[in-house]
Amino acid sequence: MSQLSVKCFGVGDGWPCADRNHSSFLYRFGKTSFLIDCGEPLDRSYKASGLSYDAFDRIFLSHLHADHIGGFFMLMQGLWLESRKKELLVHMPREGLKPLRQMLNAACIFDELLEFRLRFEALRAGTAVLSKDVRVTPFRSTHLDRLRKTFQKKYPQKFEAFCFLIEAGKMRIGHSADIGSPEDLAPLLSKPLDLLVCELAHFRPEELFDYLQQHEIKRIAFIHLGRSHWEHLKKIRRLSIKMLPDVEIHFPKDQEEIRF
């Protein structure tokens, strides 16, 4: 593994952002690379990066909120027009498989136009996805539970959302995506983490920091900060250092790359 990093294409939260892109992260482990989430404007950010359109092997969509999939369709058009050749697997909640396929067809991004094979697979909680020498295991989060309780009778779907444990050799990385409570991170924190990429939009910082200080984590990158937290970043940073004194803390911006 010659290159171990996560590139932050978008660290914004779900609100309209004038100064941040929406959620999208490229993990690179030597010859294995994959995207987690496709918030907009990923197509523009990816083109600006200069990376090959064959650089990543898979896409993981943590859930179907627009700030996590809003850039997916334009990225697919980019892969078509930039003549990607490598097979692409897209992993997502099962309820999104058919609608996303239908949207691609509605947008005239037909399989026959693509120079690569495009496959979709449903995520299953606790079932690892193996990509060469990297293991990605999705775990259920409670992020959409409130919506499920309120709307499931009218909109009968599962409202699935996932966080991810990424294992490469002895390295363990957690990626929260969007969670409903800090306790959703328990499966990722059952053993020490080398890096946790963690959202900070849906609860008070003190609540999250208090939970995290009970676990062994070398580095944390806080992303997806709620607007009020982002506007008071210096205060949040000071609090994180105070409550997590033994952890290397990052608050990355768009286009930043964190090396492991």
Image (cartoon, helix red, strand yellow):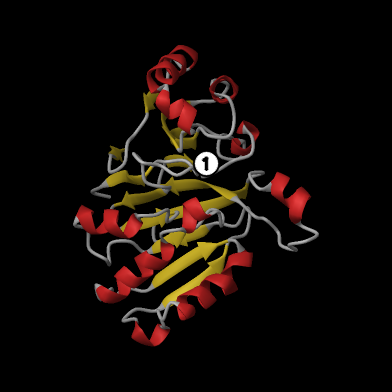
Front-most of residues 199 and 233: 233
Whether residue 239 is visible here, answered yes or no, is yes
Mark 1 — residue?
176
Q: Position of residue 15 (x, y in %)?
A: 49, 42
- 18 lies above or below 133: above
Front-most of residues 59 and 260: 59
- Amino acid, disc 1: Ser
Is 47 on the left or on the right of 127, as rendered?
Answer: left
Q: Quadrant of residue 88?
A: bottom left
Few, some or many residues within 10 Å of mark 1 (<14, 14–19, 20+) = many
Is 141 on the left or on the right of 198, as rendered?
Answer: right
Front-most of residues 127 and 158: 158
Q: Position of residue 159 (x, y in %)?
A: 67, 55
Residue under the image location 47 percent in, 80 percent down? 105
- 136 lies above or below 54: above
Q: Position of residue 12 (x, y in %)?
A: 42, 41
User: Which residue reaches farthest bottom?
Assistant: 112
User: Which residue reaches farthest left?
Assistant: 50
User: Which residue reaches farthest right?
Assistant: 153
Is 4 on the left or on the right of 169, as rendered?
Answer: left
Front-most of residues 81 and 33: 81
Q: Quadrant of residue 44?
A: bottom left
Residue under the image location 34 percent in, 72 percent down? 77
Quadrant location of the C terminus in the rendered image: top left
- Secondary element type, mark 1: loop
Q: Position of residue 209 (x, y in %)?
A: 54, 22
